[in-house]
Image (cartoon, rainbow, N blue to C red):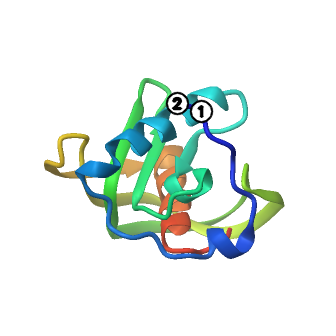
Amino acid sequence: MIRTIVKDPMFLSIKAQKAVKEDLPAVQDLVDTLRAHHDGCVGMAMNMIGIAKAAIAVDTGKMILVMINPVITKKTGAYQTSEGCLSLTGVRQTTRHQKITVTYEDLSFRKRTGEFEGFTAEIIEHECDHLAGILI
């Protein structure tokens, strides 16, 4: 189901709670909503669709990668960039990293670790900020 994008900064500032198997229907809604906004969006966090649970969806260009309960464990190659967001108006300056390591659970709740770089790393960092209640 495609959900409405939340634009309320108070709600977006709430730190996400751990996602559990019962949240999988909402995770599917997250993927559906990201696909519906494909023209102007490459990543989405659950709070952007009104659910304060820790899951993100990232369009890698080849597939939509879902990360449940993601944690960035390593960052290297800091750089400054400007980012926009469907939930917030305007563009903001922020620091991102060329390469990151993330631990997360997949859709079967199996533990995974992945290394990401470039634009995909930037998207994941942005969405993990959303989960932490950080408005970029």
Question: Quadrant of residue 36 in the image?
Answer: top right
Task: Name the spot of residue 89 as percent of width and height, x first.
Answer: 84, 58
**Residue depicted at 49% across the width and 75% down the height:** 15
Kind of residue at badge 2? Asp
Q: Is residue 24 left or right of residue 29?
A: left
Q: Is residue 136 left or right of residue 107?
A: right
Tell me the crowding category of disc 2: few under 14, some 14 to 19, or many 20 or more residues within 10 angstroms, Cα based.
Answer: some
> SS at mark 2?
helix
Give above or below for 41 relative to 75: above
Please tell me the numbered disc located at residue 2: 1
Task: Name the spot of residue 46 as percent of width and height, x first.
Answer: 50, 54
Give above or below for 54 relative to 132: above
Please tell me the numbered disc located at residue 32: 2
Foreground of the two, 24 or 90: 24
- First in residue order: circle 2 vs circle 1: 1
**Residue depicted at 55% across the width and 59% down the height:** 47
Task: Name the spot of residue 91 as percent of width and height, x first.
Answer: 81, 59
Kind of residue at badge 1? Ile
Give above or below for 41 relative to 93: above
> SS at mark 1?
loop
Task: Name the spot of residue 128 as percent of width and height, x first.
Answer: 47, 63
Q: Is residue 100 left or right of residue 46?
A: left
Foreground of the two, 19 or 119: 19
Visible in this render: residue 111? yes
Q: Are marks 2 and 1 in contact (CB under 8 Å)?
A: yes
Where does the C terminus fall, quadrant-wise? bottom right
